[in-house]
Image (cartoon, rainbow, N blue to C red):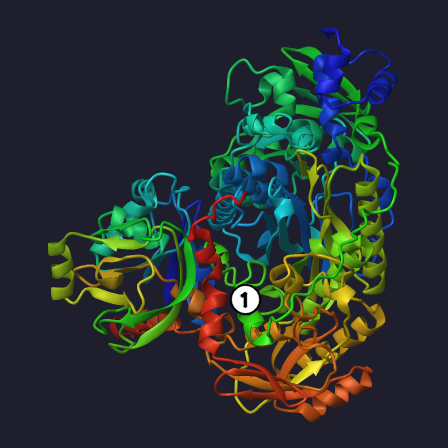
Amino acid sequence: MTTAAISPELIAQHQLTPGEYQKIVHILGRQPSYTELGIFSVMWSEHCSYKSSRLHLKKLPTRGKLVVQGPGENAGIVDIGGGCVIAFKIESHNHPSFIEPFQGAATGVGGILRDIFTMGARPIAVLNSLRFGRLDDSRTGARNRRILGGVTSGIAHYGNCFGVPTVGGECIFESCYDGNPLVNVFALGVCKKEDVFYAKAAGVGNPVIYVGARTGRDGIHGASMASAEFTEESKQKRPNVQVGDPFMEKLLLEACIEAMQTGAIVGIQDMGAAGLTCSTCEMGSRGGVGIEIELDRVPQRETGMTPYEIMLSESQERMLLVAEKGREEEVFRVFRKWGLEAVEIGLVTADGKLRVRQHGEIVAEIPNRELADEAPLYDRPHSAPPEVTKAPALPEGVTVQDALPALLAAPDICSKRWIWEQYDYQVRTNTLAGPERADAAVLRIKETGASIAMSLDGNGRYCYLSPREGAKLAVAECCRNLSVMGALPAAATNCLNFGNPERPEIMAQLVEAIEGIAEACQFFDTPITGGNVSLYNETLGEGIYPTPVLGIVGLMKTEAPVTIPFKRAGRSVVLLGGVGACNERRFGSTQYAKEMARSLWGLPPELDMDREKRVQAAIREIVTAGLAESAHDLSDGGLAVALAECSFGKAGIGAQIDLDSGLRPEMLCFHEGPSRVLVSTADAKRVAEIAARHGVEAPVVGVTIEKGIEIRQRSMTLGSWEIAALQSLYEHSLESSLSAPIAQNHV
Amino acid sequence: MKFGVIVFPGSNCDHDAFYAVSANLGQQAEFVWHDSTALGNPDAVILPGGFSYGDYLRCGAIAKFSPVMQAVKTFAAHGGLVLGICNGFQILVEAGLLPGALVRNRGLKFVCREIGLRVETAHSPFTGALEKGQVLRMPIAHGEGCYVADERTLDELEGEDRVAFRYADNPNGSLRDIAGVLSRERNVLGLMPHPERASDPLMGSSDGLGVFQSMLQAIRAVRP
């Protein structure tokens, strides 16, 4: 092995600290080669090793009676009955999507899809959680629009061609995401319980087989790039972003699933972040074996690639598998059928080492376990989350009459049709509730007759004011969305998007959010089965709001799901959970404060988890008993916005409500207190009985009507609107803001 | 009745078409792999939606050279029923079994949406169970579904009653709102909307089932 001089500069360039370098020397018992240095640097990057978060992630509940596989594999596995399981996970592709929005987002989808089908499950749904800077910002608006457009078409390009429906998600606009958009993609697949595959190498002498696309020089050090803050130079990292080929991925899916059926495959892992390096050492480490490969046999797209480049390339659409010796031909036959390259590049050994050769000579030799599982672990100092001291600034003279249309047109609240119409949300004909139809996406599982409800939720504003409470609120809302469908929340995945963990106040946000998620997931019985941490979401020292995103899945019967719009006039409108309480401090985190006061202060809405649980149990019972003609939970924009959204159905049915409360009118209509659901029903009596049994308030606040929306407070009209006018604002706001001229700089 | 569902490597609505004619319509179905030179004796053939061979070039431009398309052409020449949905329509046009071309949507974006589809003729094996003027609810999901042809071809299609469907609310800029066209012998239909996605009430509409029921009725009429 040739050993180049490893200078302190070279170590720093690889984002390794002197201490980490010493650890490498200690593990190897010698200086690493240049290739080995590269291998360690990606495996020990924040992105791959979770070195700043691992200590705290241990606090998350991961066990449950339905959980077949928790964190540590490519995706979590949950038993859904009928002999089937689902595999699901969420992943971020934030950094690449900022540098190259289209390919960054596309390969984000590709990566998470491979994580699912590498487990043997066919992907059947994708959801995404997106954050962008404001589209009307005089300085950054044009760029933010381009990023939004690129990300949307990248997701569409990949998912549509691959043939997985993109069925839901969320999209929020805040200035803090200007230089750091968030692109979190959730995917879910299904397979028979006995068909699950694990990423574990076994059987000394078994062949290691490389399949899929050839290796090129793209994406080298992608994982390390995702583990650093952005600077002005980051744009030069565009070549670090990979290029996706969804057709190749589709072939890979079909071929892998078919090859798995032969019974000749022992273990399989996709080559995602850190490519060939990660897949070899992780499979070896999980199986407690060694892996030896010869790089000359790795299919290459370019000539003259060095071992360093081949090992660190993040070229897309590649998989590594271990097959049973003597049955290679059965595997090759399947890949040939699908027109894919499959090459034996090495074998499983007994010595626990990753040994890499080129032209027969050893270029790297590292113990798998130390490389994959013994990355440095940091208990980074954490102080307190940054305090927000802004004073309440409620604008005077804004009427409810004027505020509702303004909020319905607000970027966070308005319809995201412009985005989701670019996604094929129906392919595979399982989508019972797609985007914006209901509070959660619902897919039927044809094989079992059951259905899966899914929701993604996160709220950076809440978490900025209180990471712990904000995180709990995200879990609660996610579970509530499922409960509104009549589904029982079963298990969760999370994507933790934060700034630089080396800053104690950012680290404090991360710790508090994780503890909040842990507490809430424990309470709502939704264990975390896997997920992703994305740190260093900062550009030029400007951090994002702490943004944990929860993805939770629930189980329900297959039947037409309850949707948001009112269906018939003359029905009772019930506000399950009651009008709730609020004060000026708690009002500072709302969309009303954001849009009408352009400010953020105080605290997130108050969550009483016990009450939340009872409300969810009540709505599940109401919905499964078939008593709800429509149901919609109250979230962004509060009661008035929810009421308007319920009126935007094909039937054009509105409502007249009268609220018995002494709250200030704008708080009454727009506060975002959780644990509330708006239900229309023909049987208010039975709804009241069920609610009472769960100890939940369920006042009948009004009645559905043929035309218009009217809100009264103790008989005094606060506002009345024509549905068509409101709906037009709601439907077209995003599209108009994408084409609106950008205001000139104010001096 | 037996349907043959053609599978290109990038087909992704193959299972949906299979499910619609088997589970929803209650008939037999069989997949036919793209490099087969024989179809296996089906009563009708469906070219499903998807991205045949990736479609990085013009949609369907490579698919027309596949072995199975030679078999489909022969099958059509002998009067067999051929239904091309979405990508299947694009392939039929590329293969010359139907006139015109499908180009990028007017809005330049992929569009997935439920649309109104007006039945323009009941005189075909694909629309016999439907009524002229009837408006069906059916989804579209495509990036290149704008139907174009020269004026003479369009006049000819209309003159020969070969426009099977028109959009009630044109989503992609198709000339004369055309959503589906028939071959001269009326045994080949291509359409951009997805009847297989509207064959189950749970999916929001079962209007698409009418197309498959028409095919069943036509086959039963000649082979009782």
* Residue at (86% x, 33% y) in the render: A377
Q: Residue A741, image x and y in percent? A: 43, 50
Q: Amino acid at mark 1?
A: Ala
Residue B113, how many percent across, how many down?
A: 42, 63
Q: Nearer the viewer, residue A515 or A266?
A: A515
Q: Quadrant of the N terminus of chain A?
A: top right
Q: Is disc 1 placed on a helix, strand or loop?
A: helix
Q: Is residue A364 visible?
A: no
Frontmost residue, B97 versus A393 = A393
Q: Is residue B128 visible?
A: yes
Viewed as shown, does residue A216 lie left or right of A273? left
Q: In the displayed structure, does residue A482 sit left or right of residue A571? A: right
- Disc 1 target residue: A406
A175 or A682: nearer the viewer? A175
The chain holding disc 1 is: A
Classify residue A283 as left or right of residue B135.
right
Q: Is residue B109 above or below residue A211?
A: below
The spot of residue A712 in percent (x, y) is 62, 85
Q: How many marks?
A: 1
Residue located at (43% from left, 69% from top): B198
